Amino acid sequence: MSPADSSPASQTAPVVAVVGGGQLARMMAEAAAALAIPLRLLAETPGVSAAQVIGDHLVGDHTDLAALRRLVEGCSVVTFDHEHVPSEHLRTLESEGTSVRPGPAALVHAQDKVAMRRALSALGLPVPRFAVVADLDEVTAFGLPCVLKASRGGYDGRGVWFVRTAEEAEAAMRAAAVSGVPVLAEELVDFRRELSALVARSPSGQAAAYPVVESVQRDGICHEVVAPAPGLSDALAARAQELALRIARELDVTGILAVELFETAEGGLLVNELAMRPHNTGHWTQDGAVTSQFENHLRAVLDLPLGSPRARSRWTVMVNILGGPGAEPGRLYDGYPHALARDPALRVHLYGKEPRPGRKVGHVNAYGDDLEECRDRARHAAAWFAGELGDESE
Ligand code: ADP
């Protein structure tokens, strides 16, 4: 008997299959538990983040169709912790009767940067100037400096190269050639800051837009998110939300869609990236919004009515906890007595991961009426857990 069968809720609630055992699936499980929605997980290896909390899991590879078929057996819908499942497998699952949310035709725009740029520019939406480039001559014809991106397989800044000279461009093209995927050249955008517009959309077309946030990236990794984006005019915030809602509708996205945006020096918006799953720039919603992105993702993929995306507090600041040089196994729990005593209002989310340097192992949310105070509290706690502050608890 699987754990799902032993629950009375399984008599009525459909089982949601989730591919990928990272922290996003783990946090989906929190929301699923509150709604008594059973999840079944396909984990990459035993003991990964989400497998620690989802009893009904199997271990297998997301590129293995047989494993995917085993995962969805008896599930009405499948959704994702990441966007790496091959489209052809998703089409097969669909043809065999499983609802895939988001569907493969939408998801390709989060898997393939070239497909995304082409689709958005065909819709007349604002994107950086871009071209697909095959060799160094085409890069120099496009113009330097520029940003080169592998069309597929990159994340957290991997597969992105900022090139100023022909030498740098040549080295980047060589590095990109290893992955064997097309390369995109983009203008180097002079942006004021990065914003993110998060929306949830259900198959029947209901949609909810969260407040637009500012995200601070370091080396291509999201470090800090402030909700709402400080000083953003109502007009620009509304434009960003409309843009995200329109993309969700036009691409027929189901679940959460995160639209990463550049606010340009001239005060305009350009779309950088799309993600079709809960996103790091939406972690603040766990404690700062009426309905978290994880709950709305589940509601959306099941075509249930969506929850309010409204902020519960004037400000919420999210700071990621990255494994640092001082972060050794066991350090995170050892950090609790000081961090929790120092700030009883702090919300801590750890992912059950070993804190290797640079690895995202958790985040904290601080909310309140004073932005600077929230920022200080969240930064302090994240630095403390990362082992960057020395032992100030003594
Ligand atoms: P990833 O797939 O790793 O998330 P992105 O395309 O989001 O890659 O790029 C990572 C980071 O690089 C962005 O968050 C942004 O800070 C910077 N970046 C990406 N594209 C551009 C661009 N065209 N101009 C300037 N900066 C860029």
Image: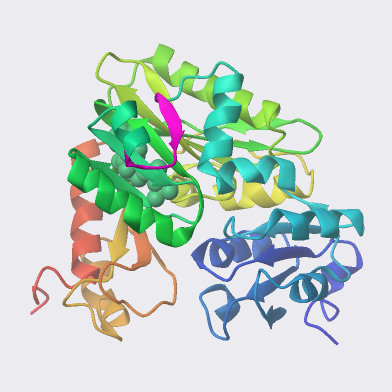
Please say whether residue 278 is visible from this viewpoint: yes
Q: Quadrant of ligand 1?
A: top left
* In the image: residue 80, left or right of residue 362: right
Residue at 56%, 15% in the rendered image: 124
Determine whether 352 is above or below 376 in the image. below
Q: Quadrant of the C terminus?
A: bottom left
- Asked which quadrant contains residue 272, the reply is top left
Residue 222 in view here: no
Query: How far across and how far down the image is residue 227, in percent?
Result: 37, 37
Numbered range of the magenta stretch = 128-136
**x, y percent for residue 43:** 62, 76
Residue in the foreground of this view, choosing between 84 and 335? 84
Residue 57, x across and y down, in percent: 69, 79
Q: Against 235, is 174 above or below?
A: below
Q: Residue at coordinates 78% horizontally, 49% vertically from top-left?
A: 302
Q: Where 26 falls versus 244 (above or below)?
A: below
Q: Front-most of 177 and 296? A: 177
Reply above or below: 107 against 58.
above
Q: Name the residue rendered at 69%, 40% in the picture.
A: 106
Q: Position of residue 393 (x, y in %)?
A: 12, 76
Residue at horizontal 22 percent and vertical 32 percent from the top: 145
Image quadrant holding the N terminus, namely bottom right
**Residue 369 part of the magenta-drawn span:** no
